[in-house]
Image: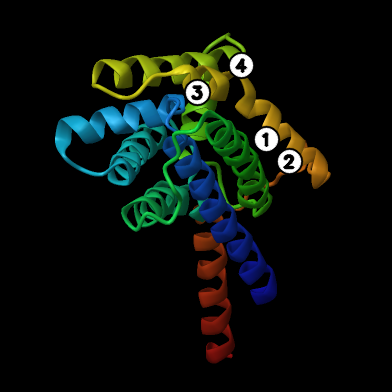
């Protein structure tokens, strides 16, 4: 049991960090941000907080909203909400990933960033500790509408992009490239690891609470006996 927990959380943390590296590479490529990061940057510009902090705040708002509609939370959901933003700020504030301006390097950064997001998504999702907040939002809306998941996801990202643009977030050709191709990079990573998302069985926080309660009862029963 403990070994399984350590493996799951190790994969989760590694995946979230790799995703953060990929996101910062997309930002530092300088050709335009991904749809959600356009929104995060817009919030950052209007409030004075960092992009990472904007990501964290947005994640918590989404988690609270989806919780009201019965979306179950996993430890991965909460850690995704917090750590992606913290890792992004750490990488950006310490200038660990360079900002590039030459087109060949910009293309390399965008391609490499999306590939790393795909790899990170595999490790994060294969930990089976709950969906990220934005994926949870998609699931909640999908359950309550007759629209396809693809339509809902696109609508959410277009909405985030539009609001972010009017808040001052950076929209560019890179934004279009990311929006059109990120799914292919994620799918490529899943194929490399032979990962079938249909076989995911998440473990949620309420599962752990029930497990702990059961163990406490068992311990009390043993003492009473």
Q: Earlier in the sequence, mark 3 or mark 4?
A: 4
The structure residue drawn at horizontal position 68% and vertical position 50%, both measured from the top left corner, is 126
Residue drawn 46% across the image and 20% down it? 157
Q: Position of residue 183 (x, y in %)?
A: 65, 27
Label 4 and label 1: CA atoms lie apart by: 15 Å
Identify the disc placed on residue 174.
3
Nearer-the-camera pick, 69 or 85: 85
Q: Does label 2 or label 4 sit earlier along the sequence? A: 4
Q: Position of residue 225 (x, y in %)?
A: 59, 90
**Residue 101 visible in rendering:** yes
Q: Residues within 10 Å of mark 2 (few under 14, many from 20)?
A: many
Q: Secondary structure at mark 3?
A: helix
32 above or below 100? above
Q: Earlier in the sequence, mark 4 or mark 1?
A: 4
Residue located beneath label 1 in the image:
186
Residue linked to disc 2: 189
Q: Are marks 2 and 1 in contact (CB under 8 Å)?
A: yes
Q: Do labels 3 and 2 touch, CB within 8 Å?
A: no
Q: What residue would you read off at disc 4?
A: 150
Sequence-earlier tag: 3 or 2 = 3
Please indicate whether residue 53 sits to the left or right of residue 31 in the image: left
Give the mark nearer the N terminus: 1 vs 3: 3
Q: CA distance from mark 1 to mark 3?
A: 17 Å
Residue 197 visible from this viewpoint: no
Task: Sort mark 3 into few (<14), some (14-19) or many (20+) by Cα contacts within 10 Å.
Answer: many
**How busy is the neighbourhood of tag 4: few (under 14 within 10 Å), some, or many (20 plus)?**
few
Question: What SS does tag 2 mark?
Answer: helix
Measure the C-alpha gap from mark 3 to mark 2: 21 Å
User: Residue 106, position in %: x, y?
Assistant: 52, 33
């Amino acid at each position: 049991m403990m070994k399984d927990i350590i493996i799951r959380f190790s994969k989760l943390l590694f995946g979230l960090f790799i995703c953060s590296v990929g996101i910062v590479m997309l930002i530092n490529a300088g050709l335009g941000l991904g749809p959600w990061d356009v929104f995060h940057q817009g919030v950052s510009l209007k409030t004075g907080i960092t992009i990472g902090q904007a990501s964290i705040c947005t994640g918590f708002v989404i988690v609270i909203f989806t919780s009201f509609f019965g979306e179950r939370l996993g430890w991965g959901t909460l850690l995704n909400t917090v750590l992606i933003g913290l890792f992004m700020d750490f990488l950006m504030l310490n200038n660990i990933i360079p900002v590039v301006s030459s087109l060949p390097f910009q293309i390399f950064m965008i391609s490499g960033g999306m590939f790393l997001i795909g790899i990170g998504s595999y490790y994060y999702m294969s930990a089976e500790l709950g969906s990220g907040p934005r994926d949870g939002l998609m699931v909640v809306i999908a359950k309550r509408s007759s629209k396809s998941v693809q339509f809902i996801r696109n609508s959410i990202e277009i909405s985030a992009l539009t609001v972010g643009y009017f808040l001052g977030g950076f929209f560019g050709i890179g934004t279009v490239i990311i929006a059109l191709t990120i799914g292919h990079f994620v799918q490529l990573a899943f194929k490399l690891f032979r990962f079938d998302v249909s076989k995911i069985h998440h473990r949620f926080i309420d599962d752990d609470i029930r497990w702990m309660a059961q163990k406490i009862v068992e311990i009390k029963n043993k003492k009473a006996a």
